[in-house]
Amino acid sequence: FIIIYFQTVLCYSVLMAGVLSLPGTIPVLFAAPFGGYLRDKYGPQLPVVIGSLLIAISSLWIAGFVWLYDFWYLMPGFIAFSIGAPMVVSTARTAAIANIAVQHRGVASGICNTARQIGGTIGLAMMSTIVISLDKLHLNKYNRFNKYIFYKFFYKVRRLTLHSKRELSTIKIKEKFL
């Protein structure tokens, strides 16, 4: 979803959105082995706690700076998330399968993957249902005035930071509807 956010909200091209996603993917290469090292040395609790803290901090960081609509403010949050997530996932999966008999570990790994996929699918379906239900309740009609002020302010600030004529024309078209 981050690539779509870069393209639709931040108005980056497809190529630039892909390039900007690289800083969030490179730390994964180092975080998973580091989580494994911490697990071997200190047990599974330490990397899971550190990874969970990094995920929580990154979520708070992104939530705190997303309103600025600037990639460079969001990047530390993306990097912290991409360090924390593999530490939690690889350590938790290894800890879950470590106590299984060797001849059953393949089946246990498959069950873990299936549970993760089903959990993600059900979670996505539930969140989509909640968002659609809130939209059907028309909760936005009580907040239209604040929304109008926010969008006017956003577009005026965004016009000051535009880098291309295409983005400027997009903003001008959107302003006509406000």
Image (cartoon, rainbow, N blue to C red):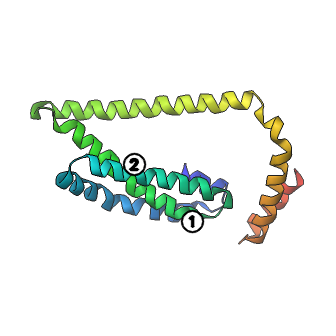
Q: Secondary structure at mark 2?
A: helix
Is residue 168 visible in the rendered image? The answer is no
- The answer to which of 60 and 4 lies nearer the viewer is 60
Which residue lies at the image location 26% right of the left edge and 32% below the top edge? 110
| On screen, residue 52 above or below 118 | below
- CA gap, disc 2 and disc 1: 30 Å
**Mark 2: which amino acid?**
Ser
Helix or strand or loop: what does disc 1 sit on?
Answer: helix
Give the residue displayed 78% in from the left and 31% down from the top.
Answer: 138
Closer to the camera: disc 2 or disc 1? 2
Q: Position of residue 164 (x, y in %)?
A: 72, 71
Q: Is residue 175 above or below residue 161?
A: above
Q: Position of residue 167 (x, y in %)?
A: 74, 64
Residue toward you, 5 or 167 = 5
Which quadrant would residue 172 be assigned to in this image? bottom right
Do the CB atoms of the residues marked 2 and 1 lie less than 8 Å apart?
no
Identity of the residue drawn at 59% across and 65% down: 73
Direction from residue 141 to residue 81 in the image, left or right: left
Residue 105's label in the rendered image is none
Left/right placement of residue 59 relative to residue 142 reads left
Instruction: Locate residue 139, reporting x and y percent.
Output: 76, 33
Q: Which residue is mark 2?
A: 52
What's the residue type where badge 1 is placed? Met
Percent of width and height locating residue 174:
82, 54
Circle 2 crowding by C-alpha within 10 Å: few under 14, some 14–19, many from 20: some
Name the mark on residue 16.
1
Considering only order in the chain, which callout, 1 or 2, is on the residue closer to the N terminus?
1
Other-residue count near label 1 (Cα within 10 Å), few / some / many at <14 / 14–19 / ≥20:
few
